[in-house]
Amino acid sequence: MAEVSINLEVMAEAVRAAERAEQVIPEAVEVLERHLRALEMDTEVLRPWRHDGERTYRLRERTKELRERRAKAHEVSEMLPTFHAMVPAVRFDEIQLTGQAEQADYAALVDDLKESWLSGTLNPAHLLAFSDLLRLHAMNPVFMKIQADRFTRLEMGQFMGSLDQIAATLPPEVRGKLGLWSGFTSGPGKGLPSNKHLVGVNPGILNTDPMDPALNQQRQVGDCWLVATLNAVMETAEGDQFIRDHVRWDPKAQGYWVTLYLPGYHVSKEFLVTEVIDEGAQADGRQGIVSIYEAAAYQAYGWSFLEGRMPWEGPAVILGDSTQTWTGAVLPIADNAAETGGSADGGVTLATTAPEQIAGGLYIPTQVVDASGNQVQIEVPANHVMEVVDIRPDGMIGIRNPWGCWLDLNHQYVRGVVYVTPEVFDQTFLAHTSTEWTMP
């Protein structure tokens, strides 16, 4: 009978390798699923654009490429032992492809839009095309650069004003599909759901509201973009003064005149607020400045605009200010957040989490340091806009939730600003938006 030699060290290493595989495989599958969800979202968003019924842009080819890359990701799933080594290369290749494949399409479309505007031939097809572009605005710095090269800020304001005039002539069912212009769907001061109610506004808010962002609460309206922006403005004395300069009490009308800006350009208009949304934003459990601004946005654009806007629209509507948004799909965003210094350093700085289908659920478990210096895990909401408050000397980034608090994994309240490391910031947030920027 042949003698069998057993190498105990080799066997032990094999057992350790098997144990590691048991830990790595579920993690690899989760990463893969997130990757696929992101690609599915890209495929939906980057659908082919048709302009004036004449030109079909090469985004159809981009969609095809994304589907092929999705199939490649499925192939990677069959190679789980080497999955982690391959994902960075696949992801980087995808990012490079995104920039190269889309740049010519963006440039051609923006050139065509400006030419039509200058010649006075803008029509609803142009509005649809530019609406599609804006849906990608926060996700693509390539487009931002192309747009800035072709339009001055004044020209962009005049151009968007022309598009606004076109939007106002379209049927509501058409306007509802136009992204930025969907606010016209319900009409100014219209569309309030049956479970929301208007109540008379209280006098004296300008004297009683301390304008402390720690006291503001978003509550039952999906306007995190608005409340987070107001929190950022209230971080400084200059911001408080800005609000006082843009909200005034009218004793005759028994309401507040609020100055808002049309999104995208520096054109302001006053709106009279005599009622606020009872279930909406409050300050310290009662009507406050946030309630007034929320009601003004409803008066200006209607319910469909108030719910679920993009982060850059807060500074645009409240301040009439331009922003730059960086996405983690392109490069780490913690460095950009650090460069702005946070809202406490002036300006408005916001962070946005990914939609649920990319985040993997309604909440993102996140390791933070609370106001008492304790390490705690909280649930950061997906598809949510938050304020970047400040950057500590040790690099930790302060985040404020417009809800007024956080929930830990045991559903206990965690109040105040929480701090995350730059690494956790990049893992948790999809995009960073700031008014403090310089176009390259």
Image (cartoon, rainbow, N blue to C red):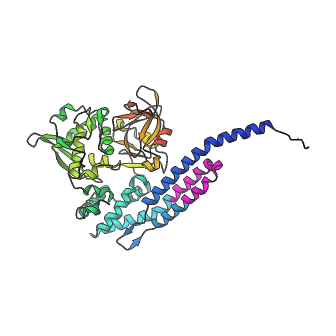
At x 31%, y 38%, the residue is 231
- Pick the front one: 56 or 355: 355
Q: Is-magenta flag for residue 80?
A: yes
At x 55%, y 50%, the residue is 32
Instruction: State the image coordinates of residue 301 (x, y, percent, origin top left).
Output: 24, 52
Is residue 55 placed above or below 137 in the rendered structure?
A: below
Instruction: State the image coordinates of residue 88 (x, y, percent, origin top left).
Output: 58, 50
Q: Quadrant of residue 12?
A: top right
Instruction: State the image coordinates of residue 312 (x, y, percent, origin top left).
Output: 34, 49
Taking the image as shown, residue 198 lies to the left or right of residue 123, namely left
Instruction: State the image coordinates of residue 230 (x, y, percent, origin top left).
Output: 29, 40
Q: Quadrant of residue 403?
A: top left
At x 36%, y 68%, the residue is 112
Is residue 69 placed above or below 288 in the rendered structure?
A: below
Q: Is-magenta flag for residue 408?
A: no
Q: Quadrant of residue 407?
A: top left
- Which residue lies most toward the top here? 372
Taking the image as shown, residue 29 lies to the left or right of residue 393, namely right
Taking the image as shown, residue 329 lies to the left or right of residue 21, namely left
Taking the image as shown, residue 236 lies to the left or right of residue 338, namely left
Which quarter of the image is occupied by the N terminus? Answer: top right
- Which residue lies most toward the front here? 1
The residues colored magenta run 69-97
- Pick the front one: 363 or 349: 363
* Any part of residue 146 in sight: yes
- Pick the front one: 6 or 268: 6
At x 33%, y 49%, the residue is 308
- Which residue lies most toward the right here? 1
* Any part of residue 150 in sight: no
Is residue 294 placed above or below 55 in the rendered structure?
A: above
